[in-house]
Image (cartoon, rainbow, N blue to C red):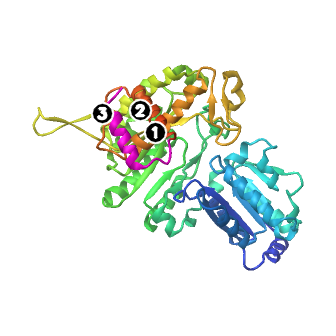
Amino acid sequence: MLNSLLRSRIQRRVEPGGPAILLTTINAKWIHPSLALRLLKANLGSLEGDCEILEFALRQPLAEKLGAIQRRRPKILGISLAIWNHSATLELLEALDRAWGEAAQRRPVVVLGGPEASYLPAEAEIFRHAGYVIRGEGEEAFRELCEALLGRGEDHGQAGHGRTTRFIKGIPADPGRIRQAYHYYNDEDLACKLVYVESSRGCPFRCGFCQSAVAGAVREFPLAPFLAEMDSLIKRGARNFKFLDRSFNADTRRALEIMDFFLRYLEAMPRTALCVHFEMFPGLFSPEVRERLRRFPAGSLRVEIGIQTLNPQAAALVNRPGNGEAELEILRFLHKETGATVHADLIAALPGENIDSFAAGFDKLWLALSEPVLQTTADAENVSPTQGGHLEIQLGILKVLPGTPLARHSAAWGIRYAPAPPYEALSTAVLPQADLDRIKNFARFWEILINRRPFPEISIVPPGKPVFRRFMDISDKLLARFGRNWGIDRQDLRLAITELTQNPP
């Protein structure tokens, strides 16, 4: 807690017309607001009122971002850095440096934080533009830094400009001491965007490709206050909740209580367009969890399941727990017995997995997700296939993220990857670049044609049959025809798909 003298010094340094502290980030899309920025502001103590949040989107012009920051003239500029905004943030910082020039009175202290800043090597180019970097959780570390900078009258304009960047380790906080920030979602956020929430931090697993493997044990926010916040959000109009918990069902009791909370709203207000998104680990589906999932009405539940690989050897190499057949059974349950929209995650280019192994796993996953659901009508002999919620295979390419165990051992497995974000794999010891490039093209067309379903009247990949080789052939031919897998005219794509499906390989 600051003493009264320090408080008065801070107040004298806050000039009218702009915030002392400006928190910003470049979100992947406009509909994805940053909970992290709101938490930093909510935990600034006596400086909370001297802080403004300013969010951008990746596709927003650089000039708009630059001008908005310059007009506010903050003393401290805090930026949240992630793999998806790294390049855009570097571009913004370079433009700000040119705009500020050498004038110390115009230059704020730049503080970088977030998951990307936490694990990048100290010599990373982007750090040359920062006075301070907070590695790890920032609620307490950022407040303490702001108090020190604004309280002691440092010549903050020169910090980090031509001088050594200073690194601060953010200590994981007790969630019970973190002040929640959901009140900083405004009416537009609640009405038009995803509402990100977190009931816990950390992950009980240590998968080698994930930064959660080094982020520490699971810590839970006190449940009663958390549910009170959810209640307030719904009453204010929030309808689309996305949980940031890495494994929502790691604690079965908490998961049940949270699901019961949302079910009470759904059952009391059946016409409310309420949707909840959970990331769940397939090995922790108790009978009670299954029973709750069955009760969610169609359209009200999204479940993300991290399958990642169905190759036991590849899973062992990256310390990924699980049982392939049991995980497929969970997917069948979600498909046949719930109305959930299911996102099944699969990663290509894991160590030890070649294209044949990956193809076999993909087909197993597709068959589990596309089996027809048989619904018996009043006539016992009249059985017809029905469709549960929307089913998607989210095919991702391995990203060798800084700080992960995989990054330390990538050479041993022959993994080559791009040095710039998103650090995507280029090849492995058993997956040549040519094969991986084909899988990347497959993944792009799969997202466009199968997950987004632009042409539902065309049977591109019939359910109940292996699809990998068939769709690989389709995606190869589409690339050869158009020379790209983006920016293709819809009608041209429809014509090409129609021709390819009428003449299957």
Mark 1 residue crowding within 10 angstroms, few (<14) / some (14–19) / many (20+): many
Residue where numbered disc 2 is placed? 474
Residue 64 in sight: yes
As drawn, 384 above or below 76? above
| Residue marked by disc 3 | 502
Task: Give, as a three-letter code, the residue at label 3.
Answer: Gln
Which one is nearer the viewer's eye here, 342 or 227?
A: 342
**Part of the protein shown in magenta:** 485-505
* Residue 281 shows in the view: no
Which badge, 2 or 3, comes first in the chain's sequence? 2
* Side (left or right) of 172 relative to 342: right
Quadrant of res 451: top left
Q: For the residue marked with disc 2, what is the amino acid?
A: Ile
Position of residue 199 measured from the top left corner of the image (x, y, whole percent):
54, 50
In three-dimensional space, the C-alpha distance between marks 3 and 1, rounded to whole angstroms, equals 18 Å
Which quarter of the rendered picture does the N terminus lie within?
Answer: bottom right
Secondary structure under badge 3?
A: helix
| Number of callouts | 3
Residue to which mark 1 is pinned: 445
Q: Which mark is residue 224?
A: none
Asked if labels 2 and 1 touch by Cβ distance under 8 angstroms, the answer is: yes
Position of residue 384 measured from the top left corner of the image (x, y, whole percent): 19, 36
- Does 254 appear in magenta? no
Q: Quadrant of residue 467?
A: top left
